[in-house]
Image (spheres, rainbow, N blue to C red):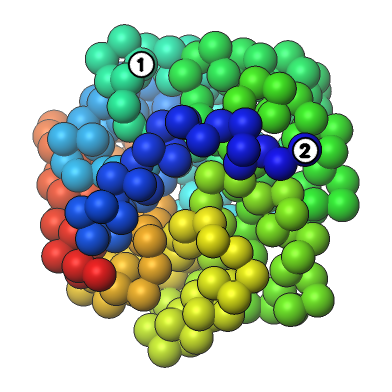
Amino acid sequence: MNAVADITQSRITRRFAKLKAEKRPGFVAFVTANDPNPETFREIFHGLPQAGADVIEVGMPFSDPMADGPSIQASSQRSLKFNTSLKDVLAAVRDFRKLDQDTPIVLMGYYNPIYVMGPAKFAEQAAAAGADGVIVVDLPPEEAEELDVHLRANRLHFIFLTAPTSSDERLPAIIARASGFLYYVAVAGITGTKSAEEFAVKDAVARLRRHTSLPIAVGFGIRTPDAARTIAHHCEAAVVGSAIVDVIAQGLNQEGQPAPGLSQKVLGFAKSLADAVHAAQH
């Protein structure tokens, strides 16, 4: 059963079709749910579409985020101080959907909280809340059926990561499961610790396109508007997470409280990234 065929009219599919028609790449912004606190997160989350985000990734906080670097690990820890659960993440998505029915939302995280909730219950409730896709960092395609069957049934995209280390022999197994778009991790290792290199990304995206017609988003290692514009020139979307999370962290006092105007500062940075990405016309 091909997941793509079942959800051809999803928000993700429509958004990438719109970007293609406009001959421009998209900007994908990542924020961790309830970071640095529920109120400030809500302001940032709700403001991202107006700041230019074409897709929003919402991090599902987890106590042991092994693929994430110090920045996103810290954002998870800040969120977990508020006992943020999957139910809270889904409630935030439902709240967002009251005001925005168009911007695609992708939930990104690890399998343990999903497993604890139950894959069927998670997929059903994520779809009901208004999510459009899921990235599960630590669930390889060979072990993904127990979640994927429920995502497909609820018309949710299962978005997979590929890395510089993903071989031509390995890619078909990933792409057979992938739906919505393919997320290329531009640097080997954890998030936010190295910079994406343009020529390596260009070659990698060209290789991926020999295997799939899915849109390709590139993330990990994009920290500035200039870097975002450069990378976006070679793919369908550029993803920025750690750099946005760092702006949040830098706007907190010693007690972890946000400085006045932090939401506006974060959204201003997001707008500078979006403007740069959208200037990289295809």
On the question of residue 245 being in view, the answer is: no
- Comparing 202 with 242, the one in front is 202
Residue 221 x/y as whole percent: 43, 70
Q: Which residue is mark 1?
A: 97
The residue lying at 30 percent from left, 55 percent from top is 20
Q: Amino acid at mark 2?
A: Met
Looking at the rendered image, the quarter that the C terminus falls into is bottom left
Question: Which tag, 2 or 1, sits closer to the chain's start?
Answer: 2
Quadrant in the picture for the N terminus: top right
Q: Is residue 180 above or below residue 282?
A: above
Name the residue rendered at 16%, 49% in the picture: 271
Residue 23: percent from left, percent from top? 23, 60
Q: Residue at x 50, y 75 (%)?
A: 205
The residue beneath circle 2 is: 1
Residue 58 — which label? none
Instruction: Decide which of 195, 5 is in the foreground and name it.
Output: 5
Q: Relative to 282, is 186 on the left or the right?
A: right
Q: Quadrant of residue 56?
A: top left
For residue 35, side relative to residue 149 (left or right): left
Crowding at label 2, few (<14), some or many (≥20) Cα neighbours within 10 Å? few
**Circles 2 and 1 in contact, beta carbons < 8 Å:** no
Q: Is residue 157 left or right of residue 277?
A: right
